[in-house]
Amino acid sequence: MEDSRIYLLTGAAGFLGNNIARQLVEKGCRVRGLVLKGDKAVKHIPEGVEIVYGDLTDKTSLENFFDVEKEQLVCIHCASIVYLKEEPSELVYRVNVEGTQNIIDFCLEKNVEKLVYVSSTGTVAELPHGEFMREPEKFDLDKIVGYYGKTKAMATQLVFDAVKEKGLKACVVYPTGICGPNDYAGGPVSTFIEQYCNGGNKVGFPGSFNSVDVRDLAAGTIAAVDKGRIGEGYILGNDVVWMKDMFAHISHASGVKMAKIILPMPLTRIIVKVSEAIGKLTNKDPLITELMLYNLVRNNAYDSSKAKRELGYQTRPFAETIYDEVEWLKEEHRVPA
């Protein structure tokens, strides 16, 4: 059956937004994508997407984005600022929190059929190692590490409050880290792989992470439009991957000699302090920060069983994702073929 709805997609030029747009266009859906003016990644948005330039913090531009007459509308809200520092940022708050409130307001005003908000597992308070973390029932900002996670938690609460108090038809997805091909926005995993394959990162930091293939995440987010229950959240993650295994996957896919040295934790902590000090002196981003190290040593085990059960969410093996990402980087001439 043909889907006659118009999909309003914020962050259409971003890593996830681009892949959601690709899958919707392939399904024959009509997509209207919100893009920040000056975003160079706009040229990679798939043909067939109607591009609307705007800003989450600018209600006039959002009015234009939502200005679609007599059509059934659904909205997938991906856009946010991914912020890797601990100190507060007014811009991050305005975009991630106030911008989400603006989207909520327009969804209510325009009687949008469904809003899917893309939150983050950064909103989920950590549990001890050995336990799986599930969708949060409430958010305790004091237990959330990093300002990005705090702003996403505040925004997610706004969505749930609007569901309960104003009748907003919405659900939430909580992605873990994102990896995979078609990363024209230059995310951290693609950047790491690119540096590794081009001779950098010959020693590794200890720890683990949880990262989902962007194609699986896009499919799960789209599935939430019709299958996600109102007022519910769904973790979209994958298995925990250890850094030493990450190196092995990249080396196998690229043919680059594997980094065999994983630094011990005491030395890593010294490097973090030196890196942050140099960053402050040079006004450049540090090689590694306390927050980045925390994300590597913390418990990264998330339970996606609810999404698998209710959304039909599926994930591919991490090794397959890395192989495809390396092949894409080769096609883009960012790593040696």
Image (cartoon, helix red, strand yellow):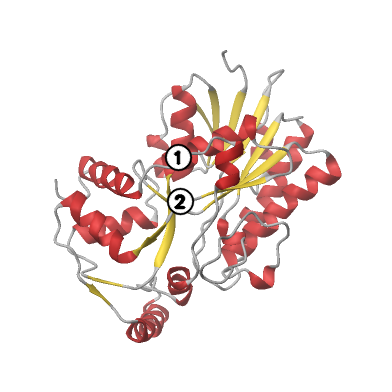
- Residue type at tag 2: Asn
The quarter of the rendered structure image containing the C terminus is top left
137 or 37, which lies in front?
Answer: 137
Residue at image coords 25%, 47% = 326
Residue at image coords 68%, 73% = 142
Query: Is 202 rendered above or below residue 70?
Result: below
Q: Is the residue under label 2 in contact with that under label 1 (CB below 8 Å)?
A: yes
Q: Residue 59 vs residue 182: left or right? A: right
86 or 126, which lies in front?
Answer: 126
- Residue type at tag 1: Asp
Under circle 2, the secondary element is loop
User: Which numbered marker is on residue 238?
Assistant: 2
Q: Position of residue 103 (x, y in %)?
A: 69, 42
User: Which numbered marker is on residue 216?
Assistant: 1
N-term mark: 1 or 2: 1
Alpha-carbon span between mark 1 and mark 2: 10 Å
Q: Nearer the viewer, mark 1 or mark 2?
A: 2
The quadrant in which residue 324 appears is top left
The quadrant in which residue 55 appears is top right
